[in-house]
Image: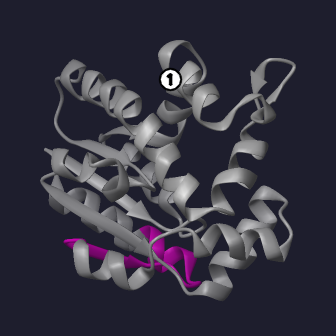
Amino acid sequence: MVVGLTGRSGAGKSVAGTVFAEHGWYVIDCDAEARAATDWGDCLAAIRRLLGDDVFTNDVLDRALVAKAVFSDLKLKSEYEATVFPFILKRINELIRGHSGNGTLLNAPTLFESGANKLCEKIIAVTADDDTLTRRIISRDNLSRENALLRLSAQKSDEFFREHADIIIDNDGDEQAFLAKCSDIAKQLK
């Protein structure tokens, strides 16, 4: 079974993924796979063609500059995603095919945008209110409030996730309740 785990930045997907891993799920961190895919070869060359040399520092892709460029321009964000997602999906498909155990969880913030939702039998969305998300992003990523809000505004809404996911896990504050719900869902789906 392949299950997609998605939601907005700061919702708690990584924590949920850790709980699933503790229950024996093979967790694919799609953000990490995206970083790996964009670090070399054809994908890196495609990024350079799209965004130019301005997003490179000492000939190395500068993710902060990429984020600044794509989160401030929705058209460019869409073009960037269309450029990198095929490379990322190829890596994810290889990982899924290489895993022979029970239960694969795709921790994928851009599950729907990338088309990875088509690989999933079930989709879980982690949600939280905007104030909670903003506070978590500022703390985690050391961003200004303005940049945190800019990042959130470039992502799908909680309403979108509520409409498109099979399972919703709310994460607005009670950490123990959130962990318990993640654990219950990981066991039920297994």
The quarter in which the N terminus is drawn is top left
Residue under label 1, please give it.
Answer: 43
Residue 57 point in image, percent of width and height = 85, 27
Left or right of 188 on screen, residue 152: right
- Above or below, 165 relative to 186: below
Residue at the (67%, 87%) spot, across then down: 131
Is residue 120 highlighted in magenta? no
Q: What element carries label 1?
A: helix
Q: What residue do we see at 45% from left, 56% from top?
A: 109
Q: Is residue 25 visible?
A: yes
Q: Position of residue 11 (x, y in %)?
A: 54, 70
Residue at image location 53% in from the left, 65% down from the top? 12
Q: In which quarter of the image is residue 129?
A: bottom right
Q: Indicate whether residue 176 is drawn in magenta.
A: yes
Tell me what residue is drawn at x 46 percent, y 35 percent.
84
Hey, which residue is sitting farthest top in the picture?
Answer: 41
| Image height of 103 relative to 184, above or below | above
Query: Is residue 29 shown to the viewer in this render?
Result: no
Mark 1: which amino acid? Cys
Is 63 left or right of 21, judged from the image as shown?
right
Task: Indicate the position of residue 32 as horizontal and vertical percent values.
Answer: 53, 35
Of 65 and 46, the residue lying toward us: 46
> For this rendering, which residue is in front, 112 or 14?
112
Q: What stretch is highlighted in magenta?
A: 165-179
Q: In this view, does 19 lie above or below 133?
A: above
Q: In which quarter of the image is residue 132?
A: bottom right
**Where on the picture, by quarter, is residue 143?**
bottom right
Q: In the drawing, does residue 183 fall left or right of residue 77?
A: left
Viewer-proximal residue among 120 and 176:
120
Q: Which residue is more in the foreground, 138 or 181?
A: 138
Q: Is residue 42 above or below residue 83?
A: above
